[in-house]
Amino acid sequence: MGLGLRSRRNFIGGLALAATLLPVSGASAQTADTVLFNGKIVTVDKDFSIREALAIGHGQVLATGTSAAMKKLAGSNAKQIDLGGRAVIPGLTDGHIHGIRAALTFGTEVNWIGVPTLEQALDKIRQAAQTQKPGSWIVVAGGWTEEQFAEKRRPTPQEVAAAAPDNPVYIQHLYDWLLLTPKAMEALDIHDDADVTPGGKLERDVDNKPTGVVVANGNALGKIFDKLPKPTLEQQVDGSRKFFREMNGLGITGIVDGGGVSMYPANYQAVFKLWRDKQLTLRVAYHLCAPKPGSELADLQNLTQLLPQGFGDAMLHFNGPGEILVWADWTDGDITPDGKTKLAELLRWAASKGYTIQIHWNPDRSVHDLLDIVEGIEKDYPVRDLRWTVLHLYNASEDNLKRMKALGLIWGVQDGLYFGGERLQHDVGVDQAKAMPRIATAMKLGLTVAGGTDAHRVSSYNPFVALQWYLDGTTIGGTQTRDQAEAPSRRQALEMYTRNSAFMANDDDRRGTLEPGKLADLAVLSADYLTAPVKDIGRIRSVLTMVGGNVVYAASPFANLAPKPSDQ
């Protein structure tokens, strides 16, 4: 906590160099407490080296090499794990996810992520209705799309009401509409468009009666969601613990949390409690959003008075403002002149404080407004050293990518088009969509491209689904929308989710690769990511996940290593 980011990088970098210079059979400081051998250790170092074994000591990678050499480092009580030829990768870091928010309600929501049929989705509603008291809310807060269902359609309000006749039901679809049953409409006192404006509109049937579907933007949906009953703090902590373990099972050992709609200071209590109680099972670099329109700069200045950049520790640290900085830019259109003025003022303040930022921006046609602002600030402050990230921007042009590279900006590319590819084709045409997003072009330009999901309201949190989409450009509905010319290589895609996302989190000095001196965050995979058919990558899971050398998740054949219930 006392070291600044640059000092910390120099210090840990020196340790890593020293570790590589010490002989393998060196002093007692090199004694391993855990050795993983007989495997395929994908280090993701600068040479993308692959080794047979890895030694861990005091939560860090001591060395990688042959099984025989690593076993020689083992202490008398060392745990020795035979990998059986399995691949090991650095723990994955989701570079942009709303994980803290998703975790709050993970234990109380119905999850439709990955459900293959509408009938199964409705059955989940029926099961919830059978286990919950009449009148209690049933909530599906996103993470699904009708394209995933074999039926290729959304549920009707009548079907949902029949599945849960005694409960109000809220079902959100991405950030464009939600479905409310009659009991939900009544409980929320929604009867007319005025009850969901600005930004919302009631869908009506042929008799001009509300159907229960509300077409709305993110701001309007957030306001409606905020009216739902909140889980207790105990439920939030339980949901957070379960959600983070769920992510551990997918090889996730770190997240860069983007804050988001409906994220107020009180919503961070659960993650901070887990941190204080030393129960976090993944590393969290969190951003703070402006909580409401109109007073964004003043609110962020107030929220960050005692939060210098990087404040925290290896498990939880503040990573700067974002992703919503000025609500006027949180749109799919063009920023207003007033919004541009406010954004410039806020970004200049962030630069003066040395803050890293993440900023949400969708359309390429208006991103020049953002880049103009950053170019002006760069004349007075070293923006290129601050690791600012532009998120989304799926239709980024090569010219704007060049401008981003010149400014040292990071491009955060999530797999949103895995859900929305068909809509993109409809909006811009099949031919234009083939080049979106221009991942390969960005990498050729030398831009740092970081991976993530933007989960869970607009996508799945599964990193292997994202990795598969980066490689094949195929949607959940089976449509290949992006041409292979813009696909990264398997190595590049894995780097997006490891070293590049760690760089975004200001954590590349201590994680993101399996090199001596780095934290022993890793995942043993159910199938080899580097050789599995691309179409099967989305089904890969972790069978053993470690954070700082501690097992946080284990499944067959390593189930005997799973944390005990008392440790969870």
Image (spheres, grey):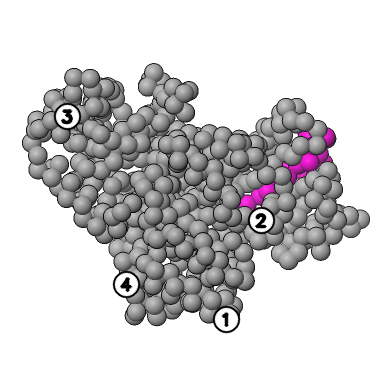
Q: Position of residue 415 (x, y in %)?
A: 49, 51
Q: Earlier in the sequence, mark 1 or mark 2?
A: 2
Amino acid bearing label 4: Pro
- Label 4 crowding class (10 Å Cα cut-off): few <14, some 14-19, many 20+? some
- Residue type at the position of mark 3: Thr
**Residue 31, numbered circle:** 3
Q: Residue under label 4, please give it.
A: 382
Q: Nearer the viewer, residue 94 or 9?
A: 9
Estimate how packed mark 1 is, as few (under 14), some (14 to 19) or many (20 or more) residues with alpha carbons within 10 Å. Answer: few
The picture places residue 304, in percent across and down from the top left corner, at 47, 62
Residue displayed at 31% across by 33% down: 549
Mark 2: amino acid: Gly
Mark whose residue sits in front, 1 or 3: 3
Magenta stretch in the rendered image? 153-178
Q: Secondary structure at mark 3?
A: loop
Q: Up-down: is 267 above or below 427?
A: above
Residue 80 placement: quadrant: top left
- Is residue 177 visible in the rendered image? The answer is no
Per the rendering, the mark at residue 222 is 2
Residue to which mark 1 is pinned: 337
- Identify the image quadrant of residue 60: top left
